[in-house]
Image: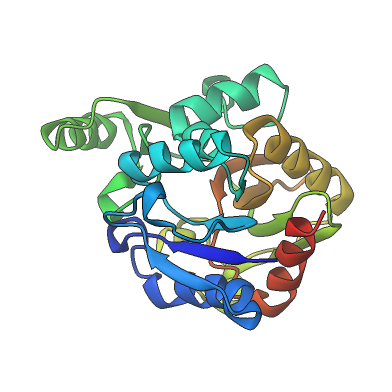
């Protein structure tokens, strides 16, 4: 099989450029595949038709090119529609409609708010902001809007253990980690929840919710964050297309390759 990989533009890989390139390389390079930067990528530039295109791209113009590849019968992982569905406002709507547990306004408990850009994934620390109270929330919203971002999501802060999960739908691959234990962080927001208590919870239930999200969003290669509350219940606070898998990269690469061969 002929593989190519489309590397995510740096602005979509804040503090993760090398990690994102590493997982793509582990999937594509062992099979003699080529990695192409997403900036300026054109479907018609592919002189030799690939069997599978592994894409970490998020730019609007690249998404349009991915749609062309799919229309020509080329398997694209993750597909263009999946990337579109992972825009936070769209994602929040899909998850709510499918009864996947997410933070809702009625869960507010006076512990603060999270303000998130809704038109895409975070490109800087200013795209996901913790606000202690309504006054900070108002100021943060104004600051975000001043940057031209008007599609905004507001969620209450939920106290509990922050758990990061990684999966490849349809392969059985699913891993969870506590960033409070390994201290791996992108923007430092994990510190808001403090050190984990390691509350007992049903990991299979979390995996079921994550895989359902993967299917309804059309994103088989995924990652996300959940908050495990003291009673063992959870909410998913983030879900995204193709993370770096830095905690489990080699295993994830094999699962992604197996997905491509189906």
Of 43 and 60, nearer the camera is 43
Q: How far from the left and from the top, in percent, is residue 124? A: 28, 55
Whether residue 18 is visible to the viewer of this picture, yes or no, is yes
Residue drawn at x 85%, y 43% is 205
Count of numbered circles in the view = 0
Of 95 and 259, nearer the camera is 259
Residue drawn at x 70%, y 69% is 252
Q: Residue furthest front?
A: 47
Residue drawn at x 46%, y 34% is 88
Residue drawn at x 52%, y 22% is 105
Whether residue 108 is visible to the viewer of this picture, yes or no, is no
Q: How far from the left and from the top, in percent, is residue 32? A: 59, 79
Q: How far from the left and from the top, in percent, is residue 181? A: 62, 75
Q: Quick check: 142 above or below 62?
A: above
Q: How is the image coloured?
A: rainbow
**Left or right: 30 as drawn, with respect to 59:** right
**Left or right: 89 as drawn, with respect to 15:** right
Give the quadrant of the N terminus.
bottom right
Q: How far from the left and from the top, in percent, is residue 175? A: 75, 64
Q: Quick check: 87 above or below 59?
A: above
Q: Quadrant of residue 179?
A: bottom right
**Left or right: 60 as drawn, with respect to 139:** right
**Left or right: 94 as drawn, with respect to 260:** left
Of 247 and 61, nearer the camera is 61
């Amino acid at each position: 099989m002929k593989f190519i990989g489309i590397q995510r533009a740096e602005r979509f890989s804040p503090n993760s450029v090398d990690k994102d390139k590493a997982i793509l390389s582990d999937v594509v390079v062992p099979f003699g595949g080529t990695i192409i930067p997403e900036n300026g990528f054109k479907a018609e530039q592919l002189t030799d038709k690939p069997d599978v295109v592994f894409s970490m791209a998020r730019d609007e113009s690249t998404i349009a090119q991915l749609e062309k590849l799919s229309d020509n019968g080329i398997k694209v992982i993750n597909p263009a529609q999946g990337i579109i569905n992972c825009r936070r406002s769209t994602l929040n709507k899909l998850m709510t409609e499918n009864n996947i547990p997410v933070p809702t306004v009625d869960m507010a408990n006076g512990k603060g708010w999270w303000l998130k850009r809704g038109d895409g994934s975070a490109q800087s620390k200013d795209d996901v902001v913790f606000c202690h109270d309504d006054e900070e929330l108002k100021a943060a919203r104004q600051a975000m809007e001043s940057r031209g971002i008007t599609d905004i999501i507001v969620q209450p802060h939920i106290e509990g253990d922050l758990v990061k999960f990684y999966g490849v739908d349809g392969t059985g691959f699913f891993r969870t980690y506590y960033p409070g234990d390994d201290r791996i962080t992108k923007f430092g927001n994990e510190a808001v929840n403090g050190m984990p208590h390691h509350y007992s919870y049903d990991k299979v239930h979390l995996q079921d919710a994550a895989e359902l999200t993967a299917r309804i969003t059309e994103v088989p290669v995924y990652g996300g964050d959940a908050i495990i509350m003291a009673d063992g219940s959870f909410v998913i606070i983030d879900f995204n297309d193709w993370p770096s898998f830095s905690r489990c990269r080699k295993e994830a690469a094999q699962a992604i390759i197996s997905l491509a061969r189906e």
